[in-house]
Amino acid sequence: MSEKPETRGSRPQAGRRAAAASQQLHGGEPAPEAEAIRVLIVDDHALFRRGLEMVLGGEDDIEVVGEGGDGFEAVEKAGDLLPDVVLMDIRMPRRSGIEACTAIKDAAPSAKIVMLTISDEEEDLFEAIKAGATGYLLKEISIDEVPHAVRAVHGGQSLISPSMASKLITEFASLAKRSEERQQQVPAPRLTDREMEVLRLVARGLGNREIAKELFISENTVKNHVRNILEKLQLHSRMEAVVYAVREKLLEIT
């Protein structure tokens, strides 16, 4: 496996330099250069890695900084390269993506990990989330959607393929029922009707952009609603909000 760090991201960097030079020629100050999102790709299929690299390499704000073919390489390169986002398969030789996920969180705590896999097994989904994954996407998604997923996860969103999100919600409901007798029930904070609408769509696995389209509101408004929901529930992530909502029976699970 060969890496060409000098070529990855060279086209976007050249484009940014040209834009800055053009602006200077017209008498303006060059705009501050935003740092590209650093991505590490880990998959045991070289052809799939190359496809992701080609798609992401064409984005001005994304730079592929490395790649690996198994969980051991994932942990080693994450520690060396400190990527912002890791796109990683689950079932790989030598060390699985789930095992690597936990180690990566220790080696590069700020990295957001997205499992990009063919596995639609519930157990893999649950174990990946427990291991610290921020996203779980099936490889059935269009490869052109991957740059958006990278940006969304880097921006703080949790992404789960809709078909897998429904399995996750069902499991949350089951856990809530099993633990109901052991937990002390406390009054749930009151959410507005609009916040409840947003929470239901979050529970379906929709991102901020999709929620905005569904409710005919701006993406910034959605972000404000999600922030208010988390503050009211005293939680830290969208995933925790869904778990809480199911446990407190704020959502109807069908």
Image (spheres, rainbow, N blue to C red):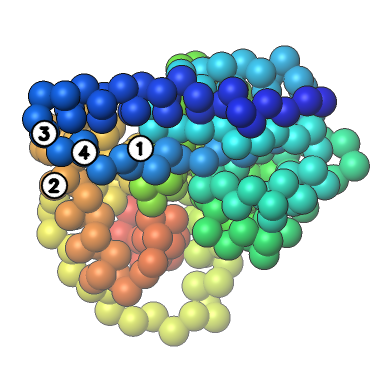
Q: Secondary structure at mark 1?
A: loop
Spatial CA span between label 4 and label 3: 9 Å
User: Residue drawn 30% across and 70% down?
Assistant: 233
Please name which of the two marks, 3 or 1, marks the residue nearer to the observer: 3
Q: Amino acid at mark 2?
A: Thr
Closer to viewer: mark 1 or mark 2: 2
Kindly identify the residue that appears in the image at 62 percent across and 59 percent down. 108
Real-space Cα separation, disc 4 to disc 2, in angstroms: 28 Å
Instruction: Please state the horizontal and vertical placement of residue 13, each as a whole percent of the image.
Output: 42, 28
User: In the image, what residue occupies the spot 25% across and 70% down?
Assistant: 231
Position of residue 26 relative to residue 77, above or below, is above
Mark closer to the chain start, 2 or 3: 3
Rate crowding at label 2 as few (under 14), some (14 to 19) or many (20 or more) other CA atoms within 10 Å: few
Residue farthest to the right, as pictured: 94
Badge nearest the viewer, 4 or 1: 4
Say which residue label 3 marks. 28
Can you identify the residue that label 2 sits on? 221
* Residue linked to disc 4: 31
Q: Regarding mark 2 in the picture, which secondary structure is present there? A: helix
- State how far apart marks 4 and 1 are (Cα): 33 Å
Do labels 4 and 3 touch, CB within 8 Å?
Answer: no
Is residue 1 shown above or below 105? above
The residue identified by callout 1 is 206
- Label 4 vs label 3, nearer the camera: 3
